[in-house]
Image: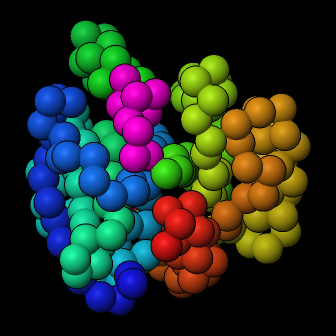
Amino acid sequence: LFSGRVDFLLSAPQLKFLPEPTVPEIAFCGRSNVGKSSLLNALTGRKSIARASVTPGRTQELNYFEVGDPTVLRLVDMPGYGYAKAPLAVVDKWKKLVKTFLRGRQVLARNLVLVDARHGFKDVDRDMMQMLDGAAVGYRIVLTKADKLKASELDRVIAAVEIEARAHPAAYPALHVTSAETKHGIPELRAAILEDANL
Ligand code: GTP
Ligand code: MG
């Protein structure tokens, strides 16, 4: 499926611009720069489908991509959080948008919380996971940029993240360890997404 049709659909700055909820959706969440767009590109085997359509500064928008012909799945590149320089009003607006989306979107098949393998969980990730736990929205934790660590360092981060994930009721206990660079973990994540979307 991922090697077939993948197209940019739209950028939604507000919930009223979301597409009709006709097919399952997978949301990609994470801190700014964690590698959301790169992971989307790696999953779909495109060099820049995610980035090409996303203008810098448009961080308030939900960017939609469609997969399949006809469309059977949509991938949602969520605005990055934890951007230090963002004004408080912008952060508040972002939180409201994301919260309402993640809690209320009926066709949301799964949420992916991306975490930089070099850093592990940050407080903004913990806030996000707590919100998802509270709303009982299930999510998979995806470590990104695994290629940037030595095997021993990676093992240590995986162990720490797995232990902490167990305390989050809505988190999948099993982690996905990925690299958009080497494509490590990409086939497994594709399979997980298809399973989540019942495809
Ligand atoms: P925002 O849209 O700004 O929130 O960022 P993002 O989460 O979409 O991150 P993006 O995919 O743009 O990647 C940020 C930087 O990390 C880029 O310079 C990427 O090339 C780099 N990067 C992303 N994934 C990987 C990876 O798996 N390995 C390595 N080495 N670099 C990566
Ligand atoms: Mg991006």
Kindly identify the residue that appears in the image at 67 percent across and 64 percent down: 176
Q: Is residue 45 magenta?
A: no
Whole-percent x and y of residue 121?
Answer: 66, 39
Figure label count: 0
Q: In which quarter of the image is ligand 1?
A: bottom left
Q: In which quarter of the image is residue 134?
A: top right
Asked whether residue 189 is in view, the answer is: no
Q: Which residue lies furthest to the front in this view?
A: 22
Whole-percent x and y of residue 125?
Answer: 58, 33
Q: Is residue 105 magenta?
A: yes
- Quadrant assignment for the N terminus: bottom left
Kindly identify the residue that appears in the image at 62 percent across and 58 percent down: 143
Asked whether residue 113 is in view, the answer is: yes
Q: Residue furthest bottom?
A: 3
Whole-percent x and y of residue 112?
Answer: 53, 51
Residue 179, placed above or below residue 124? below
Whole-percent x and y of residue 88?
Answer: 31, 11
From the viewer's perspective, is 81 left or right of 154? left
From the viewer's perspective, is 159 left or right of 171? right
Kindly identify the residue that appears in the image at 34 percent across and 44 percent down: 78
Residue 36, placed above or below residue 132? below
Kindly identify the residue that appears in the image at 28 percent across and 53 percent down: 22
Observer-nearest residue: 10 or 148?
10
Range of magenta residues: 100-108
